[in-house]
Amino acid sequence: MATIALQPRYKLVSPTRQRVLGIIYLALAFLLWFAFIRPLTADAVTTFGMTPGGLGVRELAPWQLPTRTTILLMAAVTAVVGGVQLVRGFGRWSTLVLGLVVGVFVFGFLIWSAAGRSLNLAGLLRATLSAAVPITLGALSGVLCERAGVVNIAIEGMMLAAAMMACLVGSITHNLWIGLLGGILTGALMAAVLAVLSIKYMTNQIISGTVINIFATGMTSFVSSKFLQTNQALNDPGVFRTFPIPGLVDIPLVGPIFFHNNMFVYGMFVLLFVLQFALFSTRWGLRLRSVGEHPKAADTLGINVFRTRYMAVILGGLVAGFAGSYFTLGSVGRFDEVMTAGRGFIGLAAMIFGNWTPFGSFGAGLLFGFANSLAAGIAILGSSIPSEFLLMAPYVATILVLAGVVGRGQMPAADGTPYEKE
């Protein structure tokens, strides 16, 4: 009689990881008590403003929380969760519990930082979303390329070149949409160069990407100093205006943050859903992922590995061009040298942190954007903690993910490996 092997519905958490997570939770609970509660006075109150940015919508009343009591409650909850994690764990819910514990700790840190003062929480969340846009788009570009087996560290260079070209074309034509098209096509052109070097000539993909980054930095800096800075008419494209989505923008707190933005934010959300569906629910996505996992097997089944990789890399370049255009056409309305400031590399980190998935990358992008916005907000409050430490937090989290402490990422098996047809 044939037997049927039943596959588990979820993977069990290893005992080592269970203990490590339990110790981390208890350490966070102790830190909340020792570093955050003890220095506070009994009558300290934290006020969170609920003003998302003066958008003409109904605002919520400020939140006023007793600082010591609130943080003590958070420390107690975190300690209980840590104890349960050490004794028995949470099984398939361990990742969700981890996210909740981290969220509780971050919120406790916010309450402690703003003790006796006021922090505009709604404004902080809106700034987080804005900061996450180029990072998430850069991560989506990386997801497209690496799911097909091509490492793309040239995202930074693609974004920088696209930012300059979008600004230049938009200024010359006095049309933001034509400028956006110029930026997107610039990203695609540079991606095509990367694809030819990596796929046809099988050049080391890290070296190819580094060359493109160096070229983009030098080229944009030269054009900027030679033309854009001396002729301001070439450096004034304007920006896409924000517009509300009727009905949704009236939702308290959430509406003004998510549904009163420019087209880059809405475009990011559209790309998220489209790529998530296309990669994991369509035949096209299955073929693209197959050439990134096992190109030889895909080739034997009739899938054109080279064409699929070319397509994925150029599509990634289009997304990177859209991301780069955000800096000039969706944010500041001008181009400055090296204005991407490493967002392409941060996007790669977000892609890894998000386990090479669109929605995971978006979550990681929000984390990086939140750290950036929080560092600015804490600096304004005059916290004793240097803002540089806050900016380090997402990178430390990425290192922990790669080390397998909070779950090991699963990169495509053939990522970075050139394919040579036999």
Image (spheres, helix red, strand yellow):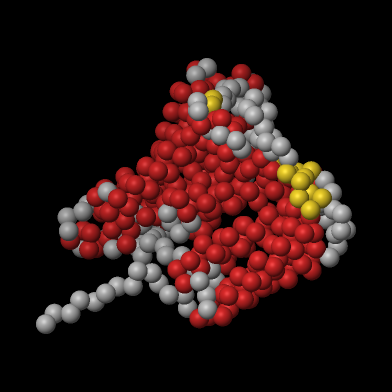
From the viewer's perspective, tell me whether residue 383 is left or right of residue 376.
Answer: right
Q: Is residue 275 above or below residue 302?
A: above
Query: Image quarter for residue 292?
Result: bottom left
In-front residue for pair 216/281: 281
Residue 143 pos. (x, y %): 42, 51
In-front residue for pair 387/280: 280
From the viewer's perspective, tell me whether residue 102 is left or right of residue 18.
Answer: right
From the viewer's perspective, tell me whether residue 273 is left or right of residue 175.
Answer: left
Q: For the view shown, which residue lies furthest in the left direction? A: 1
In-front residue for pair 233/372: 372
Query: Image quarter for residue 86?
Result: bottom right
- Quadrant, the N terminus: bottom left
Q: Residue at x 56, y 24 (%)?
A: 241
From the viewer's perspective, tell me whether residue 276 is left or right of residue 81.
Answer: left
Residue 410 pos. (x, y %): 42, 65
Q: Residue at x 61, y 18 (%)?
A: 233
- Quadrant, the C terminus: bottom left
Q: Is residue 224 visible?
A: no
Residue 303 pos. (x, y %): 21, 53
Q: Residue at x 48, y 66 (%)?
A: 93
Q: Is residue 275 visible?
A: yes
Q: Is residue 257 above or below residue 8?
A: above
Q: Residue at x 69, y 62 (%)?
A: 74
Query: Image quarter for residue 47?
Result: top right
Q: Is residue 126 above or below residue 366?
A: above
Task: Count all numbered tags in the image, as a single digit.
Answer: 0
